[in-house]
Amino acid sequence: MRNFSDLTEREVLALAIANEEEDGRIYADIAEGLREDYAATANLFTEMGAEEGEHRRRLIELYQEKFGEHIPLIRRQDVRGFIQHKPIWQIRPLGLDSVRELAETMEVETLRFYRRAASRTTDASIRRLLGDLAEAEVEHEHIAARLKQENLPTSVRQQEDAAAHRLFLLRVIQPGLAGLMDGSVSTLAPLFAAAFATGRSWDAFVVGLAASIGAGISMGFAEALSDNGSLTGRGAPWIRGGICGLMTTLGGIGHTLPFLIPAFWTALSVACGVVVVELAVISWIRWKYMDTPPISAAFQVMFGGALVFATGILIGSS
């Protein structure tokens, strides 16, 4: 890698061209990733990409005027300290707030870089060129703000934020909640049945561990295979399956771990306390994210948990 201060005026201009081209492609990738769910924001980034293309064209014309037809390939990663942006394909699914901020931070970062570079160089022509590029970035910021106002009025932004919230519920909260409920409730019966049948903490722990992991694997595959997301918009199936499976295992492990305590009745008391906490957390999530009335959510979860808990005790004590 070379230092930015070591580049010639020709190389700086070639780097600026590559920078504008890469920024335009980033905006195009964002627009493509958002188009299905957030059309207004996608249009914003399409126009931003078009503006970057226009700036690139102007830079190429200036380069041809000063240096001829051949433009050397100088990329951001070839220059020490230059702006680096994470590839869009690595941050999917795209979040509305993150991509809206990206349009501003990309221009601000590049502006600051050009200004710092201009302040360090002693070559008058390079300083003048860097200053011109910095002014172009200021213009970009104004364009980004204008396009945001034109494409994203308050009503549209509220609609897209509501859509983002619904997608978050579909892709994260629902599979996670289903897994947590299954893990917390379905493992109660085998765990406490084993505890009361054997009277030994370790035996109960082994049964609870097996039930938790087995339920996590089963729920994860069931969620992943139930819907590929193409029609429902619920997102990548294996991501949902992973969330569901992990939360199922977590729900069962919570009240299994107390049985690592050798004293059986102490372990049983702690496990019962953990169960109450787990069911309270599930009730809170249903009230917070699923618009279930708090009393109704608590009653439904506690009643179902109590039935499964009683089933385990009755079977284990028989």
Image: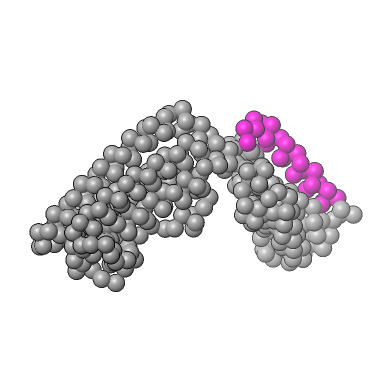
Q: Residue furthest right?
A: 318
Question: Which image quarter: residue 252?
Answer: bottom right
Of residues 193 and 233, which is closer to you in this image? 233
Magenta span main SS: helix
Question: Which image quarter: residue 260?
Answer: bottom right
Task: Please give the name of the residue rendered at 68% of the width and 36% of the height, measured from the top-left corner.
Answer: 298
Part of the protein shown in magenta: 290-314
- Residue 234 horizontal/vertical position (percent): 63, 45
Of residues 121 and 312, which is closer to you in this image? 121
Residue 65 falls left or right of residue 37: left
Task: Please give the name of the residue rendered at 82% of the width and 63% of the height, measured from the top-left corner.
Answer: 198
Determine if the magenta segment contains residue 297.
yes
Quadrant where the C terminus sits is bottom right
Task: Please give the name of the residue rendered at 76% of the width and 51% of the height, measured from the top-left corner.
Answer: 186
- Residue 154 appears anywhere in the view: yes
- Residue 174 horizontal/vertical position (percent): 65, 44
Q: Is residue 276 above or below residue 14?
A: above
- Residue 215 appears anywhere in the view: no
